[in-house]
Every structure is written in C-alpha cells, then in structure tokens.
Amino acid sequence: MTPLCFPAPLAPYACYTEKTRGRLHREDEPATRTPFQRDRDRVVHSIAFRRLMHKTQVFITHEGDHYRTRLTHSLEVAQISRSLARILKLDEDLAECVALSHDLGHPPFGHTGEDALKECMAAFDGFDHNAQTLRLLTKLERRHADFHGLNLTWESLEGVVKHNGPLVGGAADKKHGDLPAAIVEYAATHDLWLDTFASLEAQIAALADDIAYNNHDMDDGLRAGLFSFEDAASLPLMGDALKTVRDKYPNAEKNILIAEAVSVLIGVMVDDVVAETRRRVEALAPESADDIRRADRATAGFSETLQKQLDALSAFLHQNMYRHEKVNRERNQARLIVRALFEIFFERPESLPSEWRARYEGATLQNMTGARLARVVCDYIAGMTDRYAMGEYERLSGKPALP
C-alpha cells in the first residue's frame, strides 16, 4: 500500500494560522478547521463564487460548454497555487483561498464588462474588479446574522487586495487618494498594510493566475480555431512544448497533442517559479511572514528568461485571441448591454429588484445622492452572470441580446 503523503512542516516565513491577525469581527474558531480553511470554505459556499460558473473568461458562456469560465479558471488557479504552496512549504489553505477569491469581483463579460462599468462609473468613484472583490467579501455577501460579508481573516483579505504587490508607497508610486474607494473605505477600519507586499502564499496565487490563464487561453484559442497549430508551434514556450509531445507521440491526434503540450508547459512554468522563488528566498533569508511583506521586491516570481518568453506569449494571445474579430464582435455587444443596463437602472431605479432598491431607498437624506445610486446599480450589474445580464437587457430594452 502506498503511504499517505502529508504536507511537510511549514517554512518559517509561511503564514501560520495560530499567528493570524484575526478577523474584523471576533468569532470563536471551530476545533475541526483552521482559520484559513474556514476562509476557503466560506468563499466556496458564497453566492459570488457560484456565479462564476456563468461568467466569461474570454468567450461569452453561450459559445460552448468546454471553454473556460471564471469558475473553471479559478479552480485551475487554486490547483496550481496549492501545488506551489506545498512545494515551497507554505500554508496551502491560505494560498487556495486567495486563488479562489481573486476573480469574484469580475462583472459579466470579462474585461469588456469591467471596461464598460469603468466608463459608467467615471463620474462617480470608479470601478475596479479587485476592489469589487474586497467589497463582496466584506460587505455585499449576506450570509451571517452578526455582520455583512464573510469576515475573512486579515491574511486572506490582505492577499486578495495585494496579491499583485503594494498599493501605496514607493513600490506602487501611489497614495491612498489614488486607490479605489472600496479599498480606502475598508482600510480605514481594518489596516491591511497597503504599503507592503502580501504574504508569499498570496504572491504565488498571483503567479498561478498567470500560469493558468496563459495556458488555458492557448488551449481554448487552438480549440476554437482562433489561431493555427502552426502559429502556436512558432511561439516561445508553447513551440518547445509542442515539439516535446510531437516527438513523444508522433501519431497522437491534434486535441491530445494540445492537451499534452499544455500539461508540459504548466510543468515548465511551475518549475521555474519554484527555482526562482527559492533563489530569492535564499538571498532575502526571511525569518517570518512579515519579512516577506517588508521586502523591497516580490519574493515569488518567474526567472528573467521565462518572464520574457511569457511576455511574448501574452502579446501573441492579445493580438490573435483577445482582439480576434470573433471575440471583438462579442465584446462590442457586451459593452452595449452593460452600458444600457446601467443607464436604465440609474435613470429608473424602480426597475431594480426590491432588495437592491431597498439599499438605495434606505439611505439617509444626507447620502441619498447620485453617487450612492450609481454604486448600488454598479454592485447589482457587477454581480450578474453573462446570461442573467443578457436576460435583463432583453426584458428591459425589448431588444435581442445576441443580434
């Protein structure tokens, strides 16, 4: 019988659950789960997480059942994050929680929906999907009697907000006034150290995001016929991976070669992150998670060589997939839908569902302003799935969502 494989003891610079800075609202922790396990479980059981099933990654969800959605993307990021955390002796549950949470704030229709909401909210206090994630986790999810939001630990919220690096200070070259309103508002009551890097668990979750979307977008793009097998074979990283599997399986069908090449490429990227992160850890010699936070650069990362190859791969995907004629047609229609919904709900707030209308009508005379209504409308639209947004558009405009 194969022996069970238990995680190795954590590194001294990992986040230890017994040293958590706790939750904004004090709770008794159960004996059967650590605080970070509980955070992850709360995210998985949230309404916002379930909605990711029908939110666009690249293709609008009606295009096919086999293309990635925000949900399948988040699960792939979580898997890679957990693997990296185990190899680097970090807390796997915290890394997984940040990975599962990182896209919760995305509106329908992917980055196109985000761009449209930014335009709609430009006259108010803006829109940012990362800030919207924090807003969901701390305010909009309503599952507990004692508080709004999920009341996650400081470490999980810090990871969600700062997984791409410090938000203010020298490394970010920004001030608090430059940040999205949701982050400024929350930081006023719960200091998330916005001028430092996040934990190493959160940093590897951000890298896992890069690994996942570059690989699965190559996979989806090839299967959708947006670019050719020959195009992919000429690329850095992907070309080498395809050559490896072609040499090993010369008679394999095309779809098998694609899947095998993606698997090889994920392995190459994971190995590179592990080697580069270990090199940086050795140079920094951190003795605690706070040493990672206070470092003058990210401790996790790709090597310089692989980062250049990854940049070239990303540039190819932007040119040949994200800006493909087929995708652009969908993007234009998605932008129209989001703008139209915002205008309808802002001009006719009585069209909002009663529970959302109550959030506006329940405001005090002092803050019952256009900005307050705009934020309620924005929150409502940002939470929609692709198909729900299309249904609302058809119901309210009387026009087909897909011409």
Image (tube, rainbow, N blue to C red):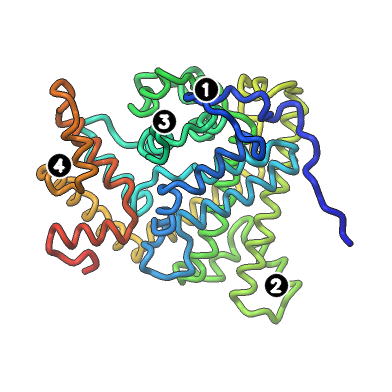
Pointer 2 and pointer 1: residues touching (CB < 8 Å)? no
Q: Which type of secondary structure does the marked residue at label 1 adopt?
A: loop
The picture quadrant where one finds residue 147 is top left
Categorize mark 4 by other alpha carbons within 10 Å: few (<14), some (14-19), many (20+).
some
Q: Sequence order check: which comes first, mark 2 or mark 4?
A: 2
- Inter-mark Cα distance, 1 to 4: 38 Å
- Inter-mark Cα distance, 2 to 3: 58 Å
The one nearer the camera, 310 or 358, is 358
Q: Which type of secondary structure does the marked residue at label 2 adopt?
A: helix
Q: Position of residue 320 (x, y in %)?
A: 44, 60
- The residue drawn where x is 71% and y is 22% is 288
- Residue 321 appears left or right of 10: left
Per the rendering, the mark at residue 246 is 2
- The reply to whether residue 140 is in sight is yes
Reading the image, the residue beneath label 3 is 146
- The residue drawn where x is 29% and y is 63% is 329
Q: Amino acid at mark 3?
A: Asp
- Inter-mark Cα distance, 2 to 4: 55 Å
Q: Amino acid at mark 4?
A: Phe
